[in-house]
Amino acid sequence: MSDDQGYQNIGGVKVTLRARLGCSRLKVREVEALRPGAVVTLDRLAGEPLEMLCRGHVIARGEVMIQDEAFALRLTEIVQRGKADELRQRRMRGRK
């Protein structure tokens, strides 16, 4: 089977895309103390691009917008495969 045939076979498969607004690290007791109205600071600055993920991998970045009364992400950058792997490895090293 050629690469083109393989791609045609998976081209119709649906995947879930997620947009990541940011992250925060809290202690369990801090999470337990959360109540309505609490503010959790994220690791991303206002105006900074959000990340779009597919199966946990960053594939693009973009800006939040409203389209037909729903949130949407206008893509400003497509992340190259090698670059996405490098970012993931950097984050994993930061968690240790």
Image: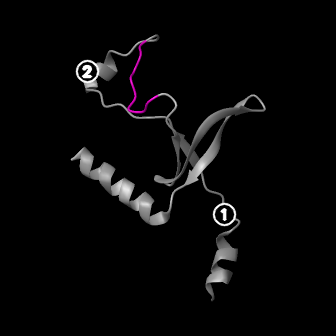
Tell me if 46 is positioned left or right of 16 in this view: left
| As drawn, 42 above or below 81 | above
Magenta-drawn segment: 38-45
Residue with the most extreme left position: 96
Tell me if 50 is positioned left or right of 9 in this view: left
State the residue at coordinates (66%, 33%): 65
Identify the element where label 2 is drawn: helix
Q: Quadrant of the N terminus?
A: bottom right
Query: What kind of residue is marked 1?
Result: Val
Q: Could you say which quadrant of the image residue 86 lies in?
A: bottom left
Identify the element where label 1 is drawn: loop
Name the residue carrying label 1.
13
Query: What kind of residue is marked 2?
Result: Arg
Sort mark 2 into few (<14), some (14-19) or many (20+) by Cα contacts within 10 Å.
few
State the residue at coordinates (41%, 16%): 39
- N-terminal of the two: label 1 or label 2? 1
Return the residue nearer the eye: 14 or 77.
77
Tell me if 61 is positioned left or right of 23 in this view: right
State the residue at coordinates (32%, 15%): 33
Q: Could you say which quadrant of the image residue 29 lies in?
A: top left
> Residue 10: x, y in percent?
65, 70
